[in-house]
Image (spheres, rainbow, N blue to C red):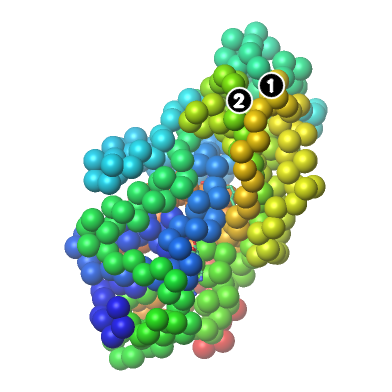
Amino acid sequence: MNGRHYDVAIIGGGIIGGSIAFELAKRRMKVVVLEKDRAVSQASSAAAGMLGAQSEFSSENPLVPMALKSRSMFPKLAEELKELTGIDIGYIEKGMLKVATTDEERMALKQQYEFWTKIGQPVQWLSPDELRQHEPNVNQSLLGVMYIPRDGQISAPHLSQAFVQASMIHGAEWYEFTEVIDIKREEDSYKLLTNQGIIRAEAVVAAAGAWTGLFLEKTGCPLPMFPVKGECLLVKTAKPLIQATIFAKNGCYIVPKKGNRLLIGATSTPNTFDKKVTVHGISSLLERAMQLVQGVGGAEWERTWAGIRPQTGDGLPYIGEHPHYRNMWIATGHYRNGILLSPITGILMADLIERRDHREIDLSPFSVKRHNGATCTT
Ligand SMILES: Cc1cc2nc3c(=O)[nH]c(=O)nc-3n(C[C@H](O)[C@H](O)[C@H](O)COP(=O)(O)OP(=O)(O)OC[C@H]3O[C@@H](n4cnc5c(N)ncnc54)[C@H](O)[C@@H]3O)c2cc1C
C-alpha cells in the first residue's frame, strides 16, 4: 500500500464506504478503502437492517425521494451481490407494522398514514380483526396499527460484507487497521498519512461514519455532527412469533430474522462514542418488546451489542464536495437510515466524482455547503 497512487481513496470501511467502493470499482476506477478497525465493524454491522423508507417519514422531507429510490433497488441488488459473492443479504419483503400504544401516538400515526396515502405509496390502516389475521401474537389492545407492505428488511452485516467482497471482486483494495491520520493537498492530488504509511489519490471520500466530523477538523471544516449510541439484543424463539417487523411509535422495534430469531432494538443515547451495553438499556427494550409481542418473555437469550449512529445537526446526511477542497468528497450522517440509503449513496457519490449530472434526485439539501462553509476556517 505504502507509496501507491489511486484514483479514489475512501476513508472508512462501513456500509457507506463499501457501497461507494463497489460502485466506483464497477466503473473501473482504481479504488482503495482505508479502515482503522476491521471492515464493517462499527454501525454497519450493528444495524437492524430495516428498509424503513416510509416508516421513517411522516411529512415532506428531502430524504423521501432518496429513501424510496434506494428501497426499490434492493431486490436487484440482492441478486447481483448473491451472484457475485455468494452472500445472501437476507432480503425479506414482509412489510412493517407501525403501532401506537397511546392516544398521542395514535394521532401521530394517523397523520403519517394520511401523508403516505396522499403521496400514493401503499399503507393500510388495520382493524383489530385484520391485525389478528396478520399477526396473532401481536398485542391486540394496541390503539392504532398501520401496515407498510414495502418496508422490508435485510441482514445488515451480510449486506455490508457483500459490498466489501463485491467491490474487491471488481478490483477495489481494502486495508484494515489502517487509520487515516492526516491529509494534505499536493498539486492535483491528495497525500494521506496513515498509521501504515502514505498513499496518494486524485480524489478522496470521507465516509468515516460518526467519526467523519472529527476527521474533517483536520481540513479546517468541522461539520456539525454528533454520535448517537444504539443498543440492541437478539433472542431465539421455539417457533416464529411474527412475520412483519413490529415498530412501536415509542422507538422499540422487533425484527424477525432467520432461524426464529428476533432482533429487538434500539436505544438512543446522544453524544457518546462509548459502546457499553447497559442493563437499563436492555431491560427497557425487553419490557417494551414483551408488551408488544406475546411469547417474547419465553425466548432464549442470544446476545447484545451497541453501535454508534452518525447524526448531523439538521438530521440530513452530507453527500457532496468539501466546501474548500476540489475532489474531496463527503458521504456521511445517514443516522438511522444508512443501511436503507447505502445503495443510492454509492451511485450518487460515484456520479458526483465523475461529475455526472444527477437530475432525478435534488442533492442541494445534502450539500456540505448548505451552511455556506460557515463552520470552516480555511
Ligand atoms: C443499533 C442500530 C440500529 C440501526 N438500524 C438501522 C436500520 O434498521 N436500518 C438502517 O437503514 N440503518 C440503521 N442503522 C443506521 C446505520 O447502521 C448507519 O447509518 C450506517 O451503518 C452508517 O454507515 P457508515 O459507513 O457511515 O458508518 P460506520 O459503519 O460506522 O463506518 C464508518 C467506518 O469508518 C471508520 N473510521 C473512522 N475514522 C477513520 C479514520 N480516521 N481512518 C480510517 N477509518 C476510519 C470506522 O472504524 C468505521 O468502520 C442503525 C444503527 C444502529 C447503531
Residue in the picture at 75% in, 22% down: 143
Q: Which amino acid does label 1 sit on?
A: Gly
What is the quadrant of the N terminus in the image? bottom left
Give me the disc on residue 115: none
**Residue at the disc numbered 2:** 237
Which image quadrant is residue 260 in?
Answer: top right
Q: Position of residue 185 (x, y in %)?
A: 38, 88
In screen coordinates, is 6 left or right of 304? left
Residue in the picture at 28% in, 37% down: 79
Residue in the picture at 80% in, 28% down: 103
* Tag in front: 2 or 1: 2
**Residue at the disc numbered 1:** 295
In screen coordinates, is 119 left or right of 5? right
In screen coordinates, is 103 left or right of 55? right
Q: Which secondary structure, mark 1?
A: loop
Q: What residue type is labelled 2?
A: Thr
